[in-house]
Amino acid sequence: MSKKIALFNHKGGVSKTTTTFNLGWKLAEMGFKVLLVDADPQCNLTGLILGYSGDEEFEEFYINYPEKNLKNALKPAFESMPKLIETIEPISVQNRKGLFLIPGHINLSEYEITLGIAQELSSSIQALKNIPGAFSYFLEKEIETYGFDFVLIDMNPSLGALNQNILMTSDYFLVPTSPDYFSKMAIDSLATILPRWQKWSENAQNLLDLEDVAYPFPKGYPKFLGTVVQKYRPRNGSATEGFQKWIDSIADSVTTNLKNKISPIEMMLPDDTYNRIGTDFNTNYCLVQIPDFNTLIATSQHHKTPVFALKDAMFGHVGAVLKQDKEKRKEFNNIFSDLATKIISLTDE
């Protein structure tokens, strides 16, 4: 059974895109068929994978391949076209068998207002009743057609209607963070926002008008997998004192606030499931900690390849510097192997 995992934090700059790309690559490396979905109008994931850095390159892509993007895939529902949503052939990610991409579109945000109106679940639902289930329907068709084991969704940093819909129609969600005050506040904010979104989803699931439609609204609620803490400065293999303070603060917010708010509304996994990856996991719900790899991230982006998959020649160094690069590559590989293994275990039903 395929697993749809949303990577979400309404705070920006927490490496959601990098985490999506690296985790997807590692899962594919482990033998799974993985689909990456760029649901962020900034299209950073699409740019990373296709090697685009400017508007002109994106414009040329949309002209040459007008159907190969998420916005176009959802067009039949959002623009009331007289045809059903169809699958689109995903793009194979260069040099990684089993990894595919549904490109984003810089104008996907145009659908935000329409979706927001539809999700009010008011009298307007008769005209817009197909919209709330459209994104989920599209992903299920992709899964059914291409046989994906995992679908990883890179979301934009906002609390808008699009993110509400994507998150609440996913199977699981992962929260990337960085060790700072703003990530701590974002966790506390999610503890307030997610119960509201769950209540909306509950209403949508119980609304008969959303059952007898072309794109039925899915049942169930997404389950919290945990957090990823990254972009901290290490010293002697651990985070420095200043960063560790915020790592501990984020863990405290998750365990004493977020967990307590989403556990009663069916957005947590059973304790036995979390215990599969360590009986102490429920003390922080942090899956992995990823230090700042500095210039290696730029090298990774240049080659459109995760740090852990870079070849020696790609580093552009020799001697002692290359040796250091190779040690970092090994460390990065261990981190994402650990993350992927934990994700597989937590989602094993």
Image: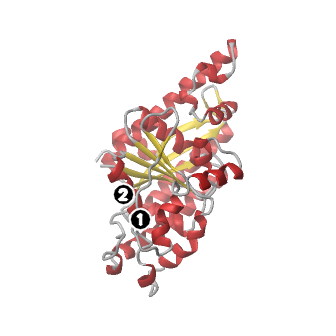
Q: Residue at x 69, y 45 (%)?
A: 53
Q: Is residue 67 above or below residue 83?
A: above
Q: Nearer the viewer, residue 235 or 92?
A: 92
Local crowd at mark 1 within 10 Å, few (<14), some, or many (≥20)? many
Residue furthest top in the image? 319
Look at label 2 and name its amino acid: Lys
Regarding residue 20, the answer to whether it shows in the image is: yes
Numbered tag placed on residue 141 in the rendering? 2
Local crowd at mark 2 within 10 Å, few (<14), some, or many (≥20)? some
- Corner quadrant of residue 322: top right
Q: Label 1: which residue?
A: 85
**Circle 1 — which element?**
loop
Q: Position of residue 170 (x, y in %)?
A: 41, 58
Q: Nearer the viewer, residue 207 or 47?
A: 47
Q: Position of residue 46 (x, y in %)?
A: 58, 48
Query: Between marks 2 and 1, how big is the CA–CA gap?
Result: 9 Å
Q: Residue at x 68, y 35 (%)?
A: 298
**Circle 2 — which element?**
helix
Number of numbered tags placed on the structure image? 2
**Residues at discs 2 and 1 in contact (Cβ within 8 Å):** yes
Residue furthest front in the image? 64
Q: Residue at x 71, y 49 (%)?
A: 54
Query: Which badge, 2 or 1, comes first in the chain's sequence?
Result: 1
Tell me the mark number nearer the camera, choosing from 2 and 1. 1
Q: Position of residue 70 (x, y in %)?
A: 51, 58
